[in-house]
Image (spheres, grey):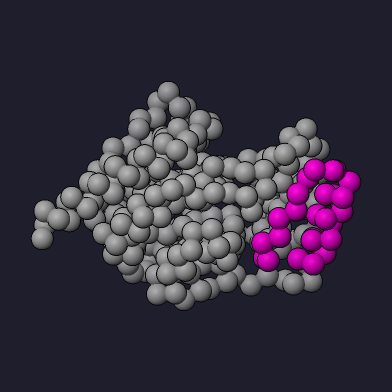
Amino acid sequence: MTATRARLPRPSADLVTPASALFLDADGTLLAFADDPDGVVVPDGMLDTLDAIHDVLGGALALVSGRAIASLDGIFGRPGWAAAGQHGLERRDAEGRTTTVPVDAGELARLRTMVHGVADRLPGVRVEDKSWSVALHCREHPEHSPELERIAPAIAARFDGFELQPGSYVYEFKPRGMDKGVAVAAFLDNEPFMGRHPVYLGDDLTDEHAFAMVNERGGASVRVGARTPSSAVFTLSSPADVHAWLDSVKTALTQGAAGRQ
């Protein structure tokens, strides 16, 4: 990862064509961050924009998030969309079929106990339990980040089946061997994503796996924000900028669809 923001151009609206597959991270990309993960707000008009793009792409649009799929459905209200939750630990295809990576329930229970113990010692640190993974959040109290950065790797080292995934003021413990790049690759091996030009938008370190994968497939990776280094080849400045860009994508796609009729 070597790119800096000064060297990354803004993507044009025609980056997404009817032959594309569009993959979208949620928090920090489609949604502005909230101190409480349950407090995020879907901006007015965004669902209409995404519905229009989803239709022109023939369903080849997927949410790819660290959140559980149930959480994504609660926020966006689109259970018919393809989605990957918990960094791909659970994946729902465009036909509604869901697959889940198996997890050692006993090991996960012990990990949960240890993570809750950390939060109890650090007031203001939140635990997010995603069913198959668990995370510590300190966005409300960033002064705890150095302590979490110190102890999180030691916790992960005690659990053979799990690995640490750092993010933006979050330290997540997830089953080993799964990431967003693996999830996107699985989508691209199946319809309606197969054979399409992949475009991926994400803001966090967790999205770098997907950036690298779509770059290898000849696709396009779009970083949201100014985090460096990054493997992304394009950049948008913020979720608000993402919304404006998606509006321009919708306009280009729908006008093109009308012209082809």
Numbered marks: total: 0
- Is 202 colored magenta in this rendering? no
Question: In this picture, is 125 found above or below 178?
Answer: above
Left or right: residue 157 compared with residue 24: right
**Near-viewer residue (46 or 105):** 46
- Could you tell me residue 213's position as x and y percent? 44, 51
**Residue sitting at the far right:** 121
Q: Quadrant of residue 243?
A: top left
Q: Quadrant of the C terminus?
A: bottom left
Q: Examine the rendering and report whether any part of residue 216 can be seen.
A: no
Q: Examine the rendering and report whether any part of residue 130 can be seen.
A: yes
**Residue sitting at the far top:** 6
Instruction: Give the residue displayed 38% in from the left and 66% down from the top.
Output: 189
Left or right: residue 22 compared with residue 67: left
Left or right: residue 33 compared with residue 144: left
- Could you tell me residue 132's position as x and y percent? 67, 65
Instruction: Give the residue displayed 80% in from the left and 51% down from the top.
Output: 155
Instruction: Give the residue displayed 82% in from the left and 64% down from the top.
Output: 110
Q: Quadrant of residue 133?
A: bottom right
Question: In this picture, is 24 found above or below 105?
Answer: above
**Near-viewer residue (168 or 256):** 256
**Near-viewer residue (90 or 213):** 90
- Could you tell me residue 238's position as x and y percent? 47, 36
**Residue sitting at the far front:** 44
In the rendered structure, which segment of residues is drawn in magenta? 108-132
Instruction: Give the residue displayed 41% in from the left and 50% down from the top.
Output: 46
- Could you tell me residue 74's position as x and y percent? 55, 63
